[in-house]
């Protein structure tokens, strides 16, 4: 059972928060008992959608569904760099880009359908800030991201993609955002190709991506690029008061 307190979430939102990554064999009653013993106010639990008995036990104990994630993988990377639409160029971010990338992430993820936004008891501005902080930290720290790809236009950074080494030559495309004024021009498609271009040069052989099941824009792009579904997870929130 992978279950621990999350000081970061407590700092962001206020309640004493625990985060759990659960498997089929875990016991909902044991997780909930641990939370009560630790005076946890909010439990955020992620588990495979195949763990139906555990899902139902969490629900029976008072947990509520907050989002559903789908994962896709591509088992052979396309190494060539794409032709970018006219007026755009790409480069890797440095720590100096952190504030600009945070501002862009704040804009693109405002009101995003993630599990924090799905919980009406959590402050929405704080939920928006999760993504801005994450994007900024991705530029600043190799522990958060191994690379951040930027697409720039004449008016500044138009899009970003954060990439993380997951071991065994697999890398994950973690957080992607395209400025609202630059959406619908294929920039996300380009970021997915550039991510593979960067990774192939670094010796990676597979790419992993995930999103909310409701995010059809990105899943359409993944299908066109030859990605295949590989896993899915529920995120539950449970309040203990
Ligand atoms: C999702 C997102 C990255 C797509 O960026 P984009 O550069 O506009 O995507 P593309 O131009 O490559 O288009 C991809 C597909 O999504 C569609 N699409 C893009 N923006 C859309 C929107 N706002 N509403 C509906 N469909 C949209 C495009 O029309 C295209 O489909 P089509 O070829 O059938 O028309 C961008 O909308 C975004 O930043 N969203 C908020 C953050 C997010 O969801 N990030 C991804 C998960 S980490």
Image (cartoon, rainbow, N blue to C red):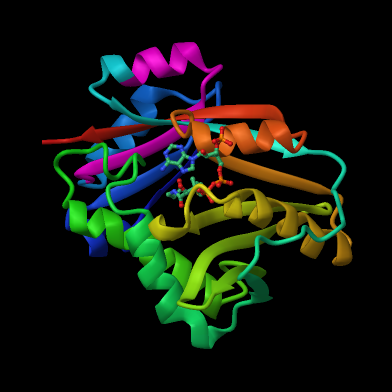
Viewed as shown, does residue 123 lie left or right of 99?
A: left
Residue 166 is at least partly visible in this image? no
Check if residue 45 falls in the magenta segment.
yes
Residue extending farthest bottom: 96
Q: Is residue 99 left or right of residue 201?
A: left
Q: Residue at x 40, y 59 (%)?
A: 181
Residue 142 placement (x, y as % from top left): 62, 74
Q: Quadrant of the C terminus?
A: top left
Please tell me in which quadrant of the rendered image residue 226 appears.
top right
Q: Residue at x 66, y 76 (%)?
A: 92
* 159 over 193 or under it: above or below: below
Q: Foreground residue, 238 or 208? A: 208
Task: State left or right for residue 5 relative to residue 82.
Answer: left
Magenta region = 40-58
Q: Position of residue 70 (x, y in %)?
A: 56, 31
Query: Residue shown at 48%/56% (left/top)?
Result: 177
**Whole-percent x, y for residue 238 in the image:** 25, 33
For this orientation, the residue located farthest to the front is 86
Residue 143 inside the magenta-drawn segment: no
Q: Is residue 190 above or below residue 233?
A: below
> Which is more toward the observer, 12 or 4?
12
Question: Where is 128 relative to 71, above or below?
Answer: below
Q: Is residue 88 above or below residue 21?
A: below
Quadrant for residue 146, please give it. bottom right
Does residue 9 show up?
yes
Residue 167 drawn at (x, y percent): 77, 55
Q: In the displayed image of the protein, which residue is found farthest to the left?
A: 241
Q: Nearer the viewer, residue 140 or 154?
A: 154
């Amino acid at each position: 059972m992978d279950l621990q307190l999350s000081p970061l979430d407590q700092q962001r939102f206020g309640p004493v928060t625990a985060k759990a990554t659960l498997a089929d064999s875990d016991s909902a009653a044991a997780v909930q008992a641990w939370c009560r013993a630790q005076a946890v106010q909010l439990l955020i639990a992620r588990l495979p959608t195949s763990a139906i008995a555990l899902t139902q036990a969490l629900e029976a104990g008072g947990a509520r569904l907050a989002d559903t994630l789908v994962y896709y993988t591509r088992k052979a990377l396309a190494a060539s760099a794409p032709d970018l639409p006219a007026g755009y160029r790409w480069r890797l971010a440095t720590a100096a880009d952190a504030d600009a990338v945070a501002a862009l992430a704040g804009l693109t993820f405002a009101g995003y359908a993630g599990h924090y936004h799905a919980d009406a008891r959590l402050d929405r501005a704080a939920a928006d800030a999760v993504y801005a902080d994450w994007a900024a930290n991705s530029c600043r720290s190799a522990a958060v991201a191994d690379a951040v790809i930027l697409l720039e236009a004449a008016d500044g950074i138009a899009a970003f993609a954060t990439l993380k080494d997951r071991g065994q030559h697999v890398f994950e495309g973690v957080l992607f955002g395209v400025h609202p004024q630059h959406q619908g021009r294929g920039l996300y498609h380009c970021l997915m190709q550039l991510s593979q271009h960067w990774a192939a040069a670094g010796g990676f052989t597979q790419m992993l991506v995930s999103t909310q099941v409701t995010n059809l824009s990105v899943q359409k792009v993944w299908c066109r690029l030859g990605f295949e579904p590989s896993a899915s997870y529920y995120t539950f929130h449970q309040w203990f008061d």
